[in-house]
Image: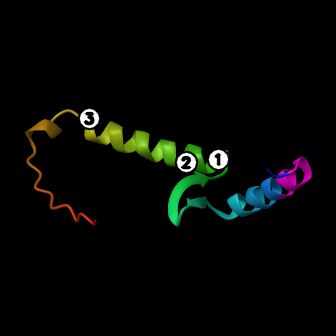
Amino acid sequence: MAGHDEFDRDLERAKEAASEGPVIIMEEDQPSYVFMTYSHFERLRAKARSLIDRLSMPGLSDIELDVDRDRKG
């Protein structure tokens, strides 16, 4: 288990990295978590809300959409 001082240093480094963009935290060579600034999170959330608002616009239920999805794995 890491000590308090070591944790503080690692947290500061992670915060500095997150100020440049989202930091992907890996577990067993797989992305598990994303650490980012709150302002970046808010921008993502606003974009998601905007997409939801657009998709719920009146009249869209009459549009047919054929989507091919590229599935990996």
* Image side of residue 24 versus residue 54, left or right: right
Image quadrant holding the C terminus, namely: bottom left
Which labelled disc corresponds to residue 39?
1
Task: Give me the residue at 13% from left, 37% from top.
Answer: 61
Looking at the image, which residue is at 51% across and 60% down?
31
Give the left or right position of residue 17, taking residue 30 as reference: right
Q: Give the range drawn in magenta.
A: 3-9
Horizontal side, residue 22 vs residue 11: left or right: left
Q: How crowded is mark 1: few (under 14 residues within 10 Å), some or many (20 or more)?
A: few
Estimate the x, y position of residue 39 in percent, counting from the top left. Answer: 64, 47
Whichever of labels 2 and 3 marks the residue nearer the N terminus, that label is 2
| Residue type (three-letter) at the residue carrying disc 2 | Arg
Q: Is mark 1 on a helix, strand or loop?
A: helix
- Its colouring scheme is rainbow
For disc 2, the marked residue is 43
Q: Is mark 3 on a helix, strand or loop?
A: loop
Q: Residue 1 appears at what percent x and percent y?
A: 79, 50
**Between marks 1 and 2, how big is the CA–CA gap?**
6 Å
Asked if residue 12 lies left or right of residue 66, the reply is: right
Q: Distance between the residues labelled 2 and 3?
A: 20 Å
Q: What residue type is labelled 3?
A: Ser
Which amino acid type is marked by label 1? Ser
Element type at mark 2: helix
**Residue identifier under label 3:** 56
Residue 11 % position (x, y): 79, 53
Locate residue 9: give its quadrant: bottom right
Contact (Cβ within 8 Å) of mark 1 with mark 2: yes
Q: How crowded is mark 2: few (under 14 residues within 10 Å), some or many (20 or more)?
A: few
Q: Is residue 72 above or below residue 1?
A: below
- Predominant secondary structure, magenta span: helix
